[in-house]
Image: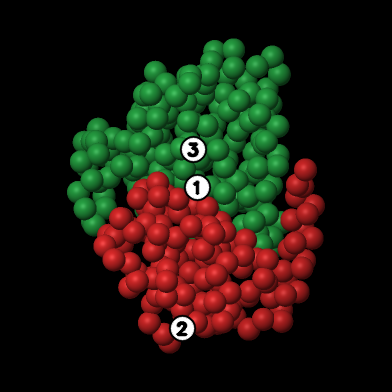
Chain colours: A red, B green
Amino acid sequence: MKSLEELKALRDKLQSDMALREDGEDKIKILVGMATCGIAAGARPVLTEFVDEIAKRGLRNVQVGQTGCIGICQYEPVVEVFVPGLEKVTYVKMTPDKVAKVVSGHIVGGAIVQEYTIGSETA
Amino acid sequence: MRELSLNILDIAENSVKAGAKLVRVTVEAVPAEDSLVLTVCDDGSGMDAEMAARAADPFSTTRTTRKVGLGLPYLKMNAGMTGGSMEIESEAGKGTKVTATFVLGHIDRVPLGDMGQTMALLAGANPEMDFVYELCVRGAEDEDFILDTRDIKRILDGVPVSEPDVMTYIASYVNENTRGLLEKYKI
């Protein structure tokens, strides 16, 4: 059973990590569309998978969040990646299976996973 | 939607947009009466009587990308499929309370599902807000579980609740501590 004691241990670990880290506006942002359309299409497990993957890899310069409907409901779940200084990349029809590749390829490696982007979709 | 926890995630978004500071989600099962009652209560901007009356109509929405809004209609449908109902009480400037009543053992009653993921995402994506989730089973002896992000934040002592490790913790804290109740009472 998870206890609040475990949260205290986690806090102590994160506090020492944060002391080492420089915080700033240079974070990579991953936003998952979580309006009704996104949720119905399976956005929640996608967001959870991003959170778990980022936590597992201990990536400290990445922020995962949610956004509303951007009007392309037929492509949900939609994920937008903002790397500071670069153009936004929009991944569509995401699934939890595709998350590891986006994190390792794009977030860590800096190479956009073209096959999952909206540009490679033929509507 | 295949889990009530997805409906909850969805309609809690209305509370976020309403500028709520505290959102309280309560799931109360009374096995002896075969009932399951879900309430989502916020202290946001609320609605006037006219908007509240139209809120469950799919052709009324606050969104700007199109003219349909399906959040509350989906929840109402899920409750209705079991012979239950949904009610919205709201007051402009005070907040909104949505109550959905289900027949617990009805074959069409959608399972509660992964409340851990729902609470972790709500808390992590809206760190300036607070969320309370209470699951209780009423019977000869009441059994319950409560998550209050104010308690979590007190322990975190400045570590952001949006940290991926913290969100993962919240999800498993909720799920591990409620799994027994959910299985025992088939919630």
Q: Is residue B101 above or below residue B32?
A: below
Tell me the quadrant of the picture where the C terminus of chain B can be found. Answer: top right
Q: Nearest the camera: B66 or A116?
A: A116
- Residue B8 lies, with reference to residue A85, above or below; the image says above
Nearer the observer, B47 or A119? A119
Give percent across and percent down for residue A118.
34, 69
Give, as a three-letter code, the residue at label 1: Leu
Cα distance in 3D space between marks 2 and 1 = 32 Å
Residue at image position (52%, 83%) is A110
Rendered residue at 40%/59% (across/down): A93
- Distance CA(mark 1)–CA(mark 3): 23 Å
Mark 1 crowdedness (10 Å alpha carbons): few <14, some 14-19, many ≥20: many
Which residue sits furthest bottom? A85
Dot label at residue A84: 2
Residue that mark 3 sits on: B3
Real-space Cα separation, disc 2 to disc 3, in angstroms: 36 Å
Category of crowding for the residue at label 3, using alpha-carbon neighbours closer than 10 angstroms: few (below 14), some (14–19), many (at least 20)? some
Mark 2 Cα within 10 Å, few/some/many (few <14, many 20+)?
Answer: few
Q: Earlier in the sequence, mark 1 or mark 3?
A: 3
Q: Chain of mark 1?
A: B
